[in-house]
Image (tube, rainbow, N blue to C red):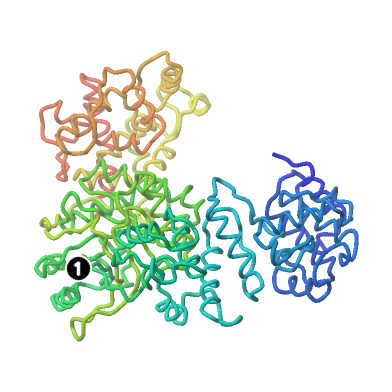
Amino acid sequence: MADEMVQRAQRFINTTYNNGATLGIAKLDENGQTGWPVMYALTRALQYEMGITALSDSFGPTTMSTIGAKYGKLDETTVPSANFCRVIQSALYCKGYDGGEIDGTYNDRVKDSVAALHKNMGVSVTYPGSALWPKTAKGLFNMDAYVTVNSGSETVRAIQQWLNGRYVLRKDFYIIPCDGHHSRDVAKSMLFAIQYELGMADGVANGVFGPGTQTGLKSRTVSVSSNSTGVWAQLFTAAMVLNKNSVAFGNFTDAVRQAVTSFQSFCGLSATGAGDFPTWASLLVSYGDQSRKGAACDGVTEITPARATALKAAGYKYIGRYLYNPSSTSLPEKAIQPGELATIKEAGLRCFPIYQTWSRSADYFSTLQGTRDAFEAIDWARYHGFKPGTIIYFAVDYDAMDGEVTDYVIPHFRAITRTISENSGYNVGVYGARNVCQRVVDAGYSSVCMVSDMSSGFSGNLGYPLPSKWSFDQISTITIGSGTGSIEIDNNIASGRDTGQGDFNPGVSFDGLDVDLDKSAYRASMLQDVKSYLTSIGVPETGGDGWTDKDWASLGGISTTEAFDAVVDSDWLFTSLARSLRMRKALIQAPVLWELRKLNPGDFVADAAVQAGLKDDCSTGWGQIFASTAIQARNYCIGEGIINGEGKDYTNADDLEEVWNKLHDDQEYNVRTVAYVLLWNSELLGIDRPDLSGDVHVTEAVLGRYNGTGPDAEQYGRELMGLYHVLENYNALSRA
């Protein structure tokens, strides 16, 4: 929503600094909306008015020191020009305060707003009156809020104001938001406050949880009988509140003691009920007291008998190991090695599996990648022999911003959960920073989480409490054992929510399974052979079936090349399905490629009729499947234990509508269903299921049944059998 005075502030910047390109002040959209572009422009304008030549978006040390050196403070007696004052007035409006008409006068309205700003910041006692001081001016020229926003907590806001008021005169302490939300800045301000109270001088206090801070806190236990009032009780209860514990900010009361006991039990600390060092540490930094010895660990080194002995002697029970290593050269022991799980079992230890490939940036995560990762994790978990019920931890191994969690990570895990739950007996866990873990758990896409708390600088750890369903809390890297038993591990606290697996099935073989097509070697020749074969049976590159090329294309038909490209671009999906179902990939590819190429205007008309409610069902999507067929095929596969899920009623209108929409809108769901229909066809025909043998009689029969029964279906089966052979030839070359 546009604000007229913010719009006037934007217009003031644009008209006053119309040589902004030379000055480095960007022209603003006069949309009446506050945002960083406006604040950056105002900051640069302020610097220009003060005579700073190297303008910057940052209200940094130079800007601060210039205010102090030139003016001391900014008020009606020191503001040097009307435009200088207009910059301040504009900033007030952009911050939600009355700027006094942007008329260049530091008048009573401006003074009242500055006083209100200081009160909201919590510094009105330190800075009485109506003058802006360097630190409060810095707070004015940014996007921090000093009133609660987005359902912020008034208790948290009171803590923020208290911190500002008590420490604003310290050299390295700057005004923090008073918006009622914990954050990176608030977490750092708490560490500064503790360091100041420990007696650290300006320049020594640095907001880092270092050795000096840790040593000082070890003698600052707070409890109902020690330091129960005063600043240390205030700091401790503030830390409790910021970690979402329901206590009053102030004294260490019996109610606080009870809350501390609960917090300690939740975090895996000794439940003393006192604010001792381990509790301070867990409240202030994500990794807490790194001297704690966990019962769990994870690492990239093989667990040999000697290492297993050393780990068990050190008190470890649960070992996290990687299912797969995508690199052939880096960390050669990262993935579980042959015989390693037997060694873990014989030592009386238990193993929990982790799946990670290249998950180090937002653009890795997507619905498609989540599906692919899930299929691959299932493959490797079965290969190693992990039993149903095992929780597989999927990694988010970077500092994901909250918006990235929404846009990338959540859709990724939605796809993982759908694939894992439908195609295996495994469960999903998430490995990542606190915010990532909590959000994935809250979305219902992970049962537990492994928290990367060693990465204390991650924004997803700073200001976020330990997730509610944490299973393993990764807090330090240490070395255990000596000699051949020496091993470097990530030391994890275990909550007991996941105890890993202590017994394993015989691993399954990958022999004979399809692999991804070697596209660089075979894509071009494979396309040529597909086109040649289809042309030989009367299916040209475009058109056909009585349609001219022009009419065919204008009505939505696609060429053989386009159909081929769609199938090959989704090769990973066909590969994953074939490997999971232990059947030949070409069997799933052939009907999909054929149906894509054969799409015709009648198909589109039928789709539109179903969408308009004129029909209940029609064949749709890449595989041209009826919803009734999809339901029956899926019901069969569920009944046979091939996939998991709840059956549906193909005579029920609501079930038909739900499944038809999935078949139409979700091509991945459609392709999965193609495979299930082919398996169901073998049941309808009373023959063996398709398997890795690629038996030609089974293959041709189930392909023909895909198009129904009778002579036309038999012809369909013969034609698709030829296409199958073309595709299988190149799949076999890739396997070899």
Dot 1: what SS? loop
Q: Nearer the viewer, residue 83 or 101?
A: 101
Front residue of this view, candidates 421 and 114: 114
Task: Tell me: residue 313, above or below residue 248.
Answer: below
Q: In the rendered view of the protein, which quadrant contains the C terminus?
A: bottom left
**Closer to the camera, 595 or 91?**
91
Q: Residues within 10 Å of mark 1 (few under 14, many from 20)?
A: some
Query: Is 589 located above or below residue 358 in the figure?
Result: above
Residue 275 as seen in the image, left or right of residue 387:
right
Asked if residue 468 shows in the view, the reply is yes
Residue at 74% x, 68% y is 134
Q: What residue do we see at 31% from left, 24% from top?
A: 627
Q: Position of residue 502 (x, y in %)?
A: 13, 60
Q: Taking 660 as reference, is 492 above or below it?
A: below
Query: Where residue 525 sits: x, y (%)?
Result: 36, 49
The type of residue carrying mark 1 is Gln
In front of the other: 249 or 212: 249
Q: Residue at x 87, y 67 (%)?
A: 78
Residue 498: x %, y % from top left = 23, 56
Q: Which residue is mark 1?
A: 337
State left or right for residue 608 relative to residue 446.
Answer: right
x%, y% of residue 492? 29, 67
Residue 736 can be seen, yes or no: no
**Outermost front residue:** 225
Report the quarter where the N terminus lies.
top right
Q: Left or right? Give the position of 567 relative to 727.
A: right
